[in-house]
Image: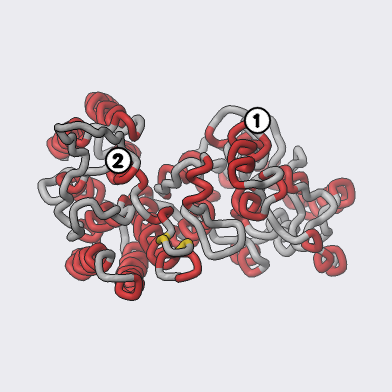
Amino acid sequence: MSKRIKRKSLPTALVRTRAILPALAIAIMGIVALLTGLPQSGSATAQASYSYTGVASCAGSTCHGRTEGNGAVVRQDEIATWQSPTAVSGAHSRAYTVLAGRRGQQIAESLGWENATSRSECLGCHATNVPVSDQGPRFHISDGVGCESCHGAAAGWISTHYKVGGTHEANLSNGLVPLEQPQTRAKVCLDCHYGSAEEGQFVTHAMMAAGHPRISFELDLFSAFQQHHDVDDDYLDRKGMTDSVQLWAVGQAEAVARATDLFSRGDLATEGVFPEFYFYDCHSCHRSITDGPDRRLTFETNPQRPIPFGQPPFNDENIIMLDAVSQALAPARADAFRSASRSFHDAMDQGRAQAEAAAIALRSEATQLSDALAARSYGGNDAFEVIAIVGGRTTNPRFTDYTGSAQAVMAVDTLLNALVRQGRITVGAAAGIRADINRAYQAVRSPESYNPGEFRSALGNAVNAIGRLR
C-alpha cells in the first residue's frame, strides 16, 4: 500500500482548507490548459477538432511530469518512468527511435524500403500512428508508443480525469480505455505484442527473416514492466484490485484467441503458395543442419501435437499454458479445450480449409475460457495449483521446444512472485528456489543453446520446491 497521506488522516485545519480547493483547482487547470494547449472543460470546439492530444499534454509538473513520484493522488512521475532511456519501463518511448537505428535500417534495407520510420507496417506498433487530422498541436509521431496508444485518444477525457470530484466512470464514458479490466488490457497489449488485423500491426515472416525479433507475450510480466502507478487506497476505491494470477491466466486465453483468430483469416495466414510462417514455431525449422553419415535429431515428439514427423508445428506456447490454466482454474472447460487444441494441430496435416475451421473452434474455446477466468474470484491455492500442473507429469513432457519452454519459466516466475506478494511464500523461501528458476532461464537463454532436457529438469525442481511450501 502507498504511504501517501489520505484525506481521512489530514489535520483538521487542512481539511477545512480543502473546501476552497475545488474552485482554485478549476482556475489553475484552466491556466494549465491555455499554456499546454489542452482543451478546457466544456470547450466543445477544441475537443471536436482532434482526438489525440499527444504526450506533452500529460507532461506538466501539475499532472504527470514530476521528477519524483510524490503526488497526493497519483504518483505524477509517470512520464519519467515512460521516458527512461535504459529501463524496460521506457521501451514504449524508445519504440520509434529504434526504427531509425541499425537494426531498423537493416530490416528496411532487406525489405526494399527507404526507411522504417515512414512505413505504416512499422508505425502501427512503434508509434501512436493516427491520421494527421486526429493529431493535436502537441502531438508528435516521434514520441513512439505514447500514453494514448494504451489509454485511448485523450481529447474526450483529458479534462474530466483531472476534474475535482470527477469519477473513473465518467472518464470511461468519455473514451478512457479501462485497462484495469484484464481482458481489455490483454487485447490492447496483444495488438502489438502478437498482432492484429489492423494496418501496421502484423509482423510477417518476411519481417522476421529481415531481422525483426520474435514476438512473445505474457500479460502479468508485461504489466509489471510498464506499471507506472501505485495500487494504493485511491486506486482500489476507483478501480478495484487486479490479481496477478488472473492477469496471467486471462492473458494466456486472450493470446490463444488472438493467434487463432488471425490464423483463420485467409488474407493473413497465407503468403502466396506458402503458409504465413509467422504463426509457426520458428525454431522447429531454424536448427543447425548437418550433412553426414550419422544423423543428429533435434526434433522431439510432443505428446499433444498429433502431427507427422518433420512438419513445422504451430507455435503453441500459449496453448500449452492455457491447457494448464484450464485444468487448474476452469476444470469444467479443460477437456473441451484440450480436444480442440489437439484437433487444431491435427488439422494442419489435412489442408487449409480444415485448419481454418479448427482454428475457429479453438478460438471459441479460448474465448469462453477467457470469459470464465475474467469472471471468477481468485485467492486460496490458485497459484499453487497452476504451478503444480505446469511442472507436472502431464505438462512437463510438452516442453520440447524453445518457445513453449520460455513461456513456462516466465509463468512459474510470475506465479511465484504472486505467492510472495500474497504472503503465502516468504521472500527468503522464494530466494532459495531462485537458483532452479535461473537455471531454467539459462536453458532458454537463446534458441541456439536451448537444451530441453536441462530445461525440464530445472523447471521440475523449481516446481517441486514451490509445492513443498504449500
Q: Which residue is mark 1?
A: 68
Tell me if mark 2 has few (under 14), some (14-19) or many (20+) residues whose alpha carbon lies within 10 angstroms of its own. Answer: many
Left or right, residue 5 beside residue 382: right
Q: Is residue 55 visible?
A: yes
Seen in the picture, residue 356 relative to 426 is either above or below; the reply is below
Q: Which mark is residue 402?
A: 2
Q: Is residue 71 visible?
A: no
Residue visible at 48% across and 44% down in the picture? 209
Seen in the picture, residue 278 relative to 80 is either above or below; the reply is below
Q: Looking at this view, is 439 or 105 the one in front? A: 105
Residue visible at 56% across and 57% down in the picture? 201
- Nearer the observer, disc 1 or disc 2? 2
Kind of residue sitting beneath label 1:
Glu
Kind of residue sitting beneath label 2:
Tyr
Residue placed farthest to the left in the image? 393
Q: Position of residue 285 (x, y in %)?
A: 32, 45
In which quarter of the view is residue 93 placed? top right
Q: Earlier in the sequence, mark 1 or mark 2?
A: 1
